[in-house]
Amino acid sequence: MAEDINGRIKALVLIRSDPMVEKNLVGELMALEEVKEAHFSSGPYDVYCIIDCPNYDSLNDLVMNNIRGIQGTKSTTTCYMSE
């Protein structure tokens, strides 16, 4: 799928959030080691982040158990990135 030459998985995670929590959400995302960037956005998604994980299992765990667990996160859409 979307592995880089080192076998790592990169993905763009698009996040819908509750109103007025975006700043806190970006801060909590940046505290996660695998999150390389996190930013506010406009349009159908409120925040997005770029993540870099060693494999699909760790990516799935990060999104399902960490990112979706941050207070104010309503939903996520994960888009795998390819080189």
Image (cartoon, rainbow, N blue to C red):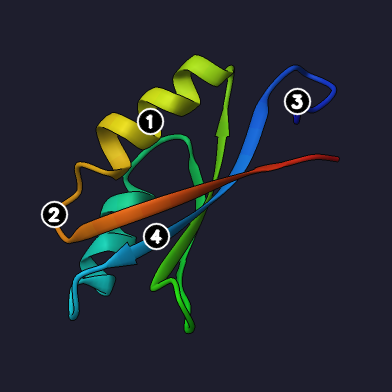
Q: Is residue 54 above or below residue 49?
A: above
Q: Is residue 78 above or below residue 47?
A: above
- Kind of residue at badge 2: Gln
Question: In the image, residue 5 lies at what x, y percent?
Answer: 85, 22
- Residue 64 lies left or right of residue 9; in this view the side is left
Label 4 CA crowd tier, 10 Å (few <14, some 14–19, many 20+)? many
Asked whether the residues under the numbered discs 3 and 2 touch, taking CB atoms below 8 Å apart as contact, a structural biologist would say: no
Label 2 CA crowd tier, 10 Å (few <14, some 14–19, many 20+)? few
Q: How many discs mark residues in the rendered view?
A: 4
Residue 3 bears which disc, if any? 3
Q: Which residue is at a point 27% across and 36% down the rendered structure image?
A: 66
Q: CA distance from mark 2 to mark 4?
A: 12 Å
Asked whether the residues under the numbered discs 4 and 3 touch, taking CB atoms below 8 Å apart as contact, a structural biologist would say: no
Image quarter of residue 21: bottom left
- Kind of residue at badge 1: Leu
Q: Which residue is mark 4?
A: 15
Secondary structure state at the residue bearing disc 2: loop
Q: CA distance from mark 1 to mark 2?
A: 15 Å
Question: In the image, residue 2 lies at what x, y percent?
Answer: 75, 31
Q: Is residue 52 above or below residue 44?
A: above
Of 77 and 27, nearer the camera is: 77
Residue 71 bears which disc, if any? 2
